[in-house]
Image (tube, rainbow, N blue to C red):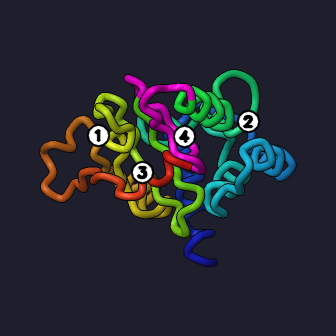
C-alpha cells in the first residue's frame, strides 16, 4: 500500500467514525465534469478523496463542501467567489484556488489546485484592507499534511488549540497578490 492509499484509508475510517451519514462518493464522471466547469484539474489526492471517501460531509469542524450536487458545492462557491472578486474594487479570490470548507464568518479552507503539493490555504476576509492578498494565509503546505493534522486532532481550529504549544498557526501566503491579479 502506498502512502497516499494509506492516507485515504485512514481518512475514510475517521470520516465514517465522525460523520453520522456520509453522502455517496462522487463518480469519476462527476469529478471530470467539475474540472471542466472549473477550468483546471483537481490535485490527485483531492479528486481521490471525493471519489473514494465521500462527496463532502466529513473533515474538520464544519466539514468539506460537496464537490458537485445540489445546494452549496465547492464548484459553485469557487465560481461565485471568483465572480464577486472580479467585480469588487479590491479583488480577493485567486485563480485556481478551490474552497473546500466553510469555516463560518465568510472564512474558507481552500486548496491551491496549481500547487504541486495542493497547499491548503485559509481565506480570512476580515484581513482585507486595500489589498485582497492580505486575506490569504497558508494553513498547511500540502493537502496530505492538512489531513494528517486533522487525523491527529492538532489543527489550529480546535477549541483547545490555544493550550497546545505545537499547534502550527497559518502564515501569510506570499503568492496571493500575483494569483489574484490573474
Residue annotated with mark 1: 158
Residue 116: within the magenta? Answer: no
How far apart are labels 3 and 2 at the CA level?
Answer: 26 Å
Residue 71 location (% of width, % of height): 69, 21
Residue farthest to the bottom, as pictured: 1
> At x 56% / y 32%, what residue is drawn?
86
**Mark 3 vs mark 1, CA separation in Å:** 26 Å
Residue at label 4? 99
Q: Are marks 4 and 3 in contact (CB under 8 Å)?
A: no
Q: Nearer the viewer, mark 3 or mark 2?
A: 3
Q: Which residues are magenta?
A: 87-106
In the picture of the structure, the residue carrying the numbered disc 3 is 176
**Of pointers 1 and 2, the one earlier in the residue sequence:** 2
Dot 2 crowding, Cα within 10 Å, few <14, some 14–19, many 20+: many
Residue occupying the point 63% across, 78% down: 1
Q: Which residue is mark 2?
A: 68
Measuring from the top left, give residue 41's x and y in whole percent.
71, 57
Q: x, y percentage for residue 45? A: 62, 61
* Quadrant in which residue 116 is drawn: bottom right
Amino acid at each position: 500500500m502506498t502512502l497516499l492509499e494509506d492516507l485515504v484509508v485512514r481518512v475514510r475510517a475517521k470520516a465514517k467514525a465522525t460523520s453520522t451519514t456520509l453522502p455517496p462518493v462522487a463518480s469519476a464522471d462527476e469529478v471530470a465534469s467539475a474540472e471542466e466547469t472549473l477550468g483546471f484539474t483537481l490535485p490527485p489526492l483531492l479528486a481521490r478523496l471525493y471519489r473514494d471517501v465521500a462527496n463532502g460531509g466529513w473533515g474538520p469542524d464544519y466539514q468539506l463542501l460537496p464537490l458537485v450536487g445540489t445546494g452549496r458545492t465547492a464548484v459553485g462557491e469557487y465560481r461565485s467567489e471568483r465572480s464577486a472578486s472580479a467585480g469588487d474594487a479590491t479583488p480577493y479570490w485567486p485563480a485556481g484556488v478551490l474552497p473546500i470548507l466553510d469555516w463560518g464568518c465568510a472564512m474558507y479552507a481552500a486548496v491551491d489546485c496549481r500547487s504541486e503539493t495542493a497547499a491548503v490555504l485559509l481565506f480570512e476576509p476580515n484581513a482585507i484592507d486595500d489589498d485582497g492578498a492580505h486575506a490569504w494565509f497558508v494553513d498547511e503546505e500540502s493537502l496530505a499534511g492538512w489531513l494528517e493534522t486533522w487525523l491527529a486532532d492538532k489543527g489550529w481550529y480546535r477549541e483547545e488549540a490555544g493550550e497546545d504549544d505545537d499547534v502550527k498557526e497559518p502564515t501569510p501566503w506570499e503568492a496571493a497578490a500575483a494569483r489574484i491579479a490573474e
